[in-house]
Amino acid sequence: MEKGNEKTVSIIVPVYNGEKYLKRCLESLLCQTWEKTEILLVDDGSADGSGQICDDFSEKYEKIRAVHTKNQGVSAARNLGMKICKGEYVSFVDADDCLAKNMIEHLVHLIEETESDVAGCSFWIFGQKEEGGRDCKRKDEEAAVCLKQTCLKKAETCLKQAEILNGQEFMEKGILQSDTRCWSKLYRRESIGSIRFQEGLTIGEDMLFLLELAKEGRQFGCSKYKGYGYFINEEGAMMHGFRDSYMDQITCWERALEILGGEASGLKSKAEAVLLVSAMLVAGKLAVLSGKERREKKKYVERCSRIVREYGRHRETFRKLDRGYKIKVTMYRYMPGIYLGLYHWKNVR
């Protein structure tokens, strides 16, 4: 693509109480080798200094825009970003993550050369555990050195080896194999059309967004290049004991089955297997609660039990489970009380 014909990439960053990591994220976006970007910071009612950081950066850099809304959740923030963005391409970045300096450029080349609707790459993981005391900044620096030395060569190699998948293939090889992330991807804005993130979910909104794109027959270009830095945030939705919002893990896969509708039975049975595993994971979170707390969450326990009873008897779905989950599902299906009691004893003693 000639320099004068570069298309604009809108990078949408939902921000909520992210002052600790936001500057690091923004610096990685400003360092992108793909120069024609607009960076949209959607401050979702932050109660810390995040909003001020957004304003400071937008005043300093012409390509950054900051908008402020009341707290409505990450899906609403992303949807607002899509409503006001101007670029031909769209990418989503979480405020505590960061990008290799050529990630956007790599994905633009990938989406253009494969003539895909969506281009995606892989990611690396970084972060710290408080009790470990490892300096997160030090780990960032180590990753940065590694990427600086190898990223251009690796990106070029991965571009040549990229896989092109149609919608159904991406459902099977991507979404149902754990590629449920909306970040680390680039989207043609016109290919997104009217598809939006489902608001009100704290878990699984990414997967449903991708599933709807795949269901509409969009084409996906997939690269193994690790261009996105995913920060393990101990305050994130998946890093805690049981919360009511954890039930969204089940809700999103129930909605996924609705979206799949009349798709091939093989796809539906795989999705049912993921739903079964999700129900077992949530049941495990419930099991470690005290007896009193678990009784207060009785409706959630019953919901997990219903899913296991209903889908655990589907032979094709059951075959999709690994051996460990086959044992767990069978035990929970026939002896839910004993299973929860043993799980509690094993994990709380």
Image (cartoon, grey):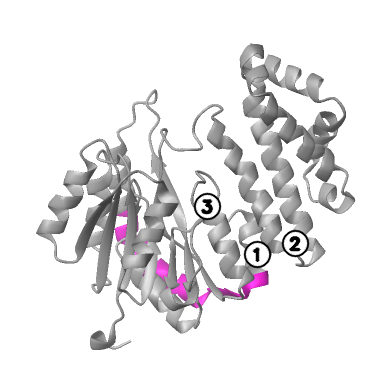
Q: Which mark is residue 171?
A: 1
**Does the magenta run of residues contain 103?**
no
| Residue at x 66% of width, y 56% of height | 256
Say few, some or many: other residues with alpha carbon within 10 Å of mark 2 (under 14 / 14 to 19 / 20 or more): some
Residue bearing mark 2: 267
Q: Mark 1 is on which residue type?
A: Met
Q: Is residue 32 visible?
A: no
Q: Where, by quadrant of the figure, is residue 263 drawn?
A: bottom right
> Quadrant of the image for the N terminus?
bottom left
Percent coordinates x, y for residue 334 in the rendering: 87, 29
Residue bearing mark 3: 205
For the magenta stretch, what is the residue range? 145-168
| Residue at x 62% of width, y 59% of height | 175
Residue closest to the far left: 60
Q: Are marks 1 and 3 in contact (CB under 8 Å)?
A: no
Q: How much space separates mark 3 and mark 2, taking CA atoms? A: 19 Å
Percent coordinates x, y for residue 3 in the rendering: 24, 85
| Residue at x 66% of width, y 50% of height | 253
* 3 vs 2, front mark: 3
| Residue at x 39% of width, y 57% of height | 78
Q: Are marks 3 and 2 in contact (CB under 8 Å)?
A: no
Q: Mark 3 is on which residue type?
A: Glu
